[in-house]
Image (cartoon, rainbow, N blue to C red):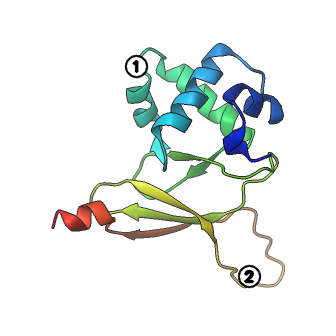
Amino acid sequence: MKNELLSAEALLEHAGVRVTAVRILILKAIRRDFQNAFSLADLEASLPSVDRSTLFRTLTTLTEAHLLHEIDDGTGAQKYCLCHHDDTQHCPGHVHLTCVRCHRTYCLTTVEIPSVPLPEGFLAEHAEYVVKGICAECAKQK
């Protein structure tokens, strides 16, 4: 069943994460408030009643459970995005777009990272693919 169709509680259970009230609250807020990548500061603004350390620990837990993936988009702030897949063991790589004006990052979940030929003996463990440019909203404000 698609992760998007599961309740927050069921999604945590499916991923093997201990279900707590605060984890449900945070996962619901992420699903409700962030269609694209977000930072810890964004989540803090969305949930001002939850302390920063609890938010950070929960983001770490959700990332380790492959419910979120981390994005290093070069802005200096670690970003996170919901994984939109059924496999709780692996979040397939996809392309991200980062706007150089507003610093928002967008996931292109249907665009996979292109295959890169590697030198003999080299084993890739992780890949990130970030395209930097100007988003549609910022382009309108020219």
Label 1 or label 2, whichever comes before in sequence order: 1
Give the image quarter of residue 123: bottom right
Q: Quadrant of the C terminus?
A: bottom left
- Residue occupying the point 75% across, 30% down: 12
> Does the residue at mark 1 contact the one at mark 2 (Cβ under 8 Å)?
no
Q: Which label is found at residue 118? A: 2
* Residue 119 rendering spot, x and y as whole percentages: 75, 84
- Name the residue nearer the viewer: 126 or 37: 37
**Which residue position is annotated with label 1?**
48
Is residue 128 among what the camera can see? no
- Could you tell me the amino acid type at mark 1? Pro
Asked if residue 85 is positioned above or below residue 96 in the image, the reply reads above
Asked if residue 2 is positioned above or below residue 135 in the image, the reply reads above
* Residue 77 rendering spot, x and y as whole percentages: 43, 46
- Could you tell me the amino acid type at mark 2? Leu
* Residue 132 rendering spot, x and y as whole percentages: 40, 69
Is residue 127 among what the camera can see? yes
- Name the residue nearer the viewer: 72 or 26: 26
In this view, the residue farthest toward the left is: 142
Q: Which label is found at residue 33? A: none
| Horizontal side of residue 46 vs 26, given as left or right | left
| Horizontal side of residue 103 vs 77, given as left or right | left
Q: CA distance from mark 1 to mark 2?
A: 45 Å
- Residue occupying the point 41% across, 50% down: 76
Give the image quarter of residue 63: top right
- Count residues near mark 1 (Cα–Cα under 10 Å), then give few for <14, some for 14-19, many for 20+: few
- Residue occupying the point 17% across, 62% down: 141
- Name the residue nearer the viewer: 1 or 100: 1
- Residue occupying the point 44% across, 58% down: 74
